[in-house]
Image (tube, helix red, strand yellow):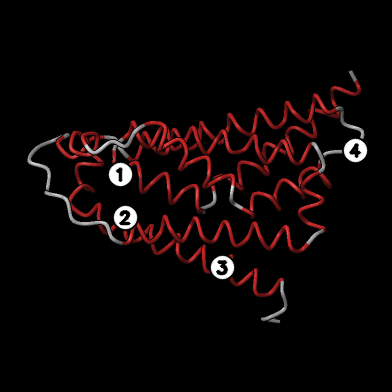
Amino acid sequence: MENLSIYLGEFLTIATLHFLAVASPGPDFAVTTRYSISYGRHTGRWVALGIGTGIFLHVAYSVLGVALVIHRYQWVYGSLLLLGAGYLGWLGWQAIQAQPHAAPANQGAGARQAENLSLPASKAFRIGFLTNGLNVKATLFFLALFSTVIAPSTPTLIKVGYGVYMAIATAAWFLLLATLITWPPFLNRLWAISHWIDRAMGVALLGLALKLIYDWLVLIKIIV
């Protein structure tokens, strides 16, 4: 019972830190918002599931100790920074080129029009997975989590359990976002300006990509 209480305290700390991290605006938020509004609830939910599944990638290399290797070797970390910057930059550039949609004719028409533009589920899932998987800030978060908050003596099975919780909680959060933001009365109002929301999310993604490039330049000491 004493050991269980230790793990419960660990879990509550992890759950709190994870909630603060997942709720803060970032690439996952921008991508879920952009694809939900532009392509409908169905697509947004698949993006959310991809994001949640991406958490397993971070958990896997953290449990195996690979996160320490990533942090220790600058060329590995620098490569991840550039990969992440390139992917977010590509998504941002696509979003910035969004074109206006016709204004919805009646209640719920915006939601129906968005669903008609739905992407294949596999592509939406892949976008979410890669967005989260290439998020180096998530790498640092899990590195800090598994090296400071989670005790070295915590059994691997318990660590995996923490990871499963974080993956499910992440997917649930973004599924909720995709659902709420595509609620017909709400989306009906947003549909006519959805291209501006797309472009704003594109600017945000490009900004995040530039921040990763800046971090890379600092890492290789071009910028002090």
Q: Position of residue 205 (x, y in %)?
A: 45, 59
Q: Which residue is mark 2?
A: 198
The Cα–Cα distance between marks 1 and 2, rounded to whole angstroms, is: 8 Å
Q: Is residue 54 left or right of residue 189?
A: right
Measure the C-alpha gap from mark 3 to mark 1. Answer: 25 Å
Distance of label 1 from label 4 (alpha carbons): 43 Å
Query: Residue at point 72% right, 78% down?
Result: 221
Furthest-left residue in this view: 105
* Residue 153 at x, y percent in the picture: 92, 33
Quadrant location, the N terminus: top right
To which quarter of the image does residue 179 belong?
top left
Q: Nearer the viewer, residue 50 or 80?
A: 80
- The answer to which quarter of the image holds residue 59 is top right
Q: Amino acid at mark 3?
A: Lys
C-alpha span from label 2 to label 3: 20 Å
Marked residue nearer the N-terminal end (2 or 4): 4
Q: Quadrant of residue 75?
A: bottom right
Residue 78 point in image, percent of width and height: 68, 63
Q: Amino acid at mark 4?
A: Pro
- Alpha carbon distance from label 2 to label 4: 43 Å
Which residue position holds label 1?
37
Q: What quarter of the picture does the C terminus occupy?
A: bottom right
User: Which residue type carries mark 1?
Assistant: Ile
The residue that label 4 is drawn on is 152
Q: Which residue lies under the disc numbered 3? A: 211
